[in-house]
Amino acid sequence: MKYINILVPLDQNRMGVNGEVYPFSGFITSKNFLDNDDLRNGFSGILEGNCSKYFLKWLDQKIWVVIRTENKNIVTVDYYNNIIKFKNGLILYSGNLSSSLNYIKNYIKNVEV
């Protein structure tokens, strides 16, 4: 089974784009997930943190969370910026943008279980 890592921007209240508040750790499941490309219905983020650095800076969020989920559980919303949405996952790390990207790059990139 292949797992993927998702970089998720949160506001200062740990709220995502869909209005759900993310805990500091643990397994999360979206209360309103729909299998479509509407970011308001499910959790969303950037696949493996791979997108334009300008896009990341444009988001300008204070909190960035790294979440792991199964690759079969994602819906691609924007191919250019690697924006995906997902129903559930495990919170692995919370920090600022730089430390979260570093976490993906150095600790969990391409891990298979």
Image (cartoon, rainbow, N blue to C red):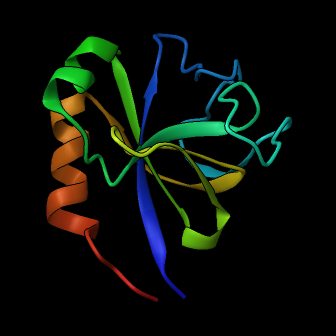
Going by the image, does 111 lie left or right of 113?
Answer: left
Residue at point 49% right, 82% down? 2
Question: What x and y, as percent, mark residue 8?
Answer: 44, 36
* Quadrant of residue 65 within the rendered picture: top left
Quarter that holds the N terminus: bottom right
Residue 60 visible in image: no
| Among the 4 quarters of the image, the one containing residue 58 | top left
- Image mark count: 0
- Residue 107 in view in this figure: yes
Instruction: State whether residue 53 is above or below residue 79.
Output: above
Q: Could you tell me which residue is drawn at 71 percent across and 24 percent down?
A: 40
Q: Position of residue 75 (x, y in %)?
A: 62, 52
Please tell me which residue lies in front, 30 or 75. Answer: 75
Q: Is residue 64 left or right of residue 96?
A: right
Q: Residue at x 15, y 34 (%)?
A: 98
Residue 72 location, x and y as percent? 63, 71
User: Which residue: 34% across, 38% down?
Assistant: 81
Residue 80: % across, % down: 34, 41
- Is 65 situated above or below 93? above
Q: State whether residue 95 is above or below residue 71.
A: above
Relative horizontal placement of residue 46, taking residue 21 as reference (left or right): left
